[in-house]
Image (cartoon, rainbow, N blue to C red):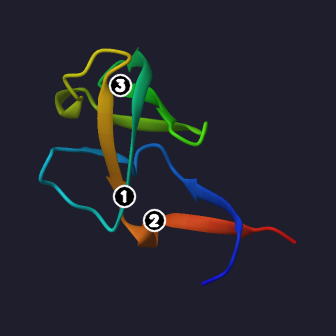
Amino acid sequence: SGRSGTLVIRPEIVRFLGETEQAEAMTEGCLYAEYALGSRNQYEIDLSDGTRLTAEVLRKDRPLVAPGGKVRLGWDLAHCHLIEDH
């Protein structure tokens, strides 16, 4: 739409996608780090443009990828917000 800004997505909204899974918005990156938070795990993912994205999932939904491995991520557009540049 020609708008620019910062896209804000809560970490628990981002989900890991299998090879054939789809989402309204998707990206790929390399898993940088994993942190255990009790029943949830938090992940930092480096995207190709240098952005670091954070995802938080239930421990049972964690990806079986070691740091440095490639992951696919997705989320629904209704759950993200654009903070427009002025």
Q: Residue 39, position in %: x, y?
A: 29, 24
Residue under label 3:
41
Mark 3 and mark 2 lie on one chain; the one further toward the N terminus is: 3
The disc labelled 3 sits on which kind of residue?
A: Asn
Q: Is 78 left or right of 16, judged from the image as shown? A: right
Q: CA distance from mark 1 to mark 2?
A: 7 Å
Q: Is 82 left or right of 23, judged from the image as shown? A: right
Q: Residues within 10 Å of mark 2 (few under 14, many from 20)?
A: few
Residue 65, picture quadrant:
top left
Q: Is 19 left or right of 41, judged from the image as shown? A: left
Residue 77, picture quadrant:
bottom left
Relative depth, front residue between 86 and 79: 86
Q: Are marks 1 and 2 in contact (CB under 8 Å)?
A: yes
Per the rendering, the mark at residue 75 is: 1
Q: Secondary structure at mark 1?
A: strand
Q: CA distance from mark 3 to mark 2?
A: 20 Å
Q: CA distance from mark 1 to mark 3?
A: 17 Å
Q: Secondary structure at mark 2?
A: helix
Residue under label 2:
79
